[in-house]
Image: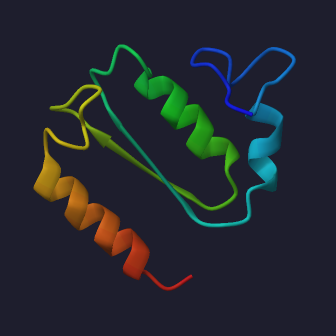
Amino acid sequence: MAIPLGRWRSGENSAFPRLATVTQPTLVANGVHDVMVPAHDSFVMSQHLPDAELVLYSDAAHGFLFQPAERFAERVNRFLASPR
């Protein structure tokens, strides 16, 4: 079930209580200037996932995947290559 933006931390269908049950390593990334998904939400999410790495791009917004595309791709590759 998809959780609408803004309700992932609260409400009847909140995903927040389930974050602690995620067992796989998780890369949480966001642009600092994202107005649709605030960077603070990514920080909170990363603090409640058992094995999370947080990457925030200070020069990007909601398009952080594309704005610093080469840096993001390199970061994803490093995350996927790291032994767990």
In this picture, residue 30 sits left or right of residue 46: left
Residue at point 57%, 44% (across, down): 46
x and y, in percent, of residue 47 in the image? 62, 43
In this picture, residue 70 sits left or right of residue 30: left
x and y, in percent, of residue 11 in the image? 81, 14
Quarter of the image for residue 61 reads top left
Residue at point 57%, 19% (across, down): 5
Q: How many marks?
A: 0
- Quadrant (top left/top right/bottom left/bottom right) for the C terminus: bottom right
Q: Establish if 82 lies above or below 63.
A: below
Residue, far right: 12
In this picture, residue 23 sits left or right of residue 61: right
**Foreground of the two, 1 or 45:** 1
- Quadrant (top left/top right/bottom left/bottom right) for the N terminus: top right
Residue, far bottom: 83
**Foreground of the two, 42 or 70:** 70
Residue at point 50%, 34% (across, down): 42
Q: Establish if 81 lies above or below 54.
A: below
Quarter of the image for residue 64 reads top left
